[in-house]
Image: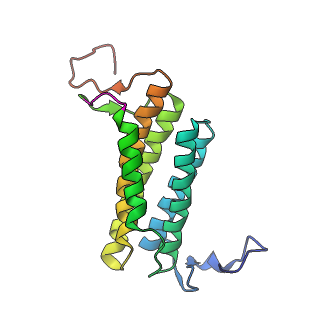
Amino acid sequence: MGKRLTRIYTRTGDDGTTGLGDGSRTAKDDSRIEAIGSVDELNCVLGVLLCEEPSDTVRECLIGIQHRLFDIGGELSIPGHRMVADSHVHKLEQILDELNAGLPPLEDFILPGGTRAAALCHQARAVCRRAERRAYTLGKESEINAASTRYLNRLSDLLFVMSRYLNRQAGKPDVLWEQGENKNTQRP
């Protein structure tokens, strides 16, 4: 582990650069920093979701995911470093299958909503998709851990299913998309 910060401000970023975990510096708008920032934002949204006090099953899952996201951020911060493995991806797939097993089949697109927890889970899913896109962009420029991008891809799927699971646990139906202009003329 690197040095612990005793002072939060260093002034070293005043020139538009930021430090990476390997000691090098890069521009704050570099694609690596964009990827790290998106993963960090996703972790923050999951933290807000955890404030909704989900069931123990969901809580333990989300806390584990937060730790893996920190690992991914570490990988992105130290080029060439590997912390996430395919076993982590398989674990997400297992959880996804378990949560999805009790849900009714999808027949329509669904909108974010139902409960606050489910809506936050949808927000996390959207941020996760962005983090995956940013990691993919970085991967075109620099070698990154492919297991981490697979993890982000699977995580967005899990968050979608988890949003449905959270609604079902709360006794709320999925919010279905109403296709077409003439479905409900009372809505804007």
Q: Is residue 38 left or right of residue 105?
A: right
The rendered magenta stretch, by its main secondary structure, is classed as loop
Position in image of residue 16 (x %, y %): 56, 76
Q: How is the image coloured?
A: rainbow
In the image, residue 85 lies in the stretch drawn in magenta: no
Let me know if residue 36 appears in the view: yes
Tell me residue 137's x, y (percent): 33, 69
| Residue 167 rendering spot, x and y as whole percentages | 45, 28
Image-based side of 82 in relation to 154, left or right: right
Q: Quadrant of the C terminus?
A: top left
Q: Residue at x 39, y 41 (%)?
A: 98
Q: Which corner quadrant holds the N terminus?
A: bottom right
> x, y (%) of residue 35?
44, 66
When asked about the image quadrant of residue 96, the answer is top left
Q: Residue at the location (57% across, 79% down)?
A: 21
Front residue (pair 58, 111):
58
At x 47%, y 60%, the residue is 38
Left or right, 152 with reference to 65 = left
Q: Is residue 166 positioned above or below 182 on the image?
A: below
From this view, report whether residue 93 is shown above or below residue 22.
above
Is 2 in front, or is 88? 88
- Seen in the picture, residue 5 relative to 44 is either above or below; the reply is below
Tell me the residue at 53%/72% (across/down).
Answer: 74
Q: Using the rendered image of the protein, determine whether residue 114 is visible from the camera's viewpoint.
A: no
The magenta stretch is 102-106
For residue 107, what is the image quadrant?
top left
Count of labels shown? Answer: 0
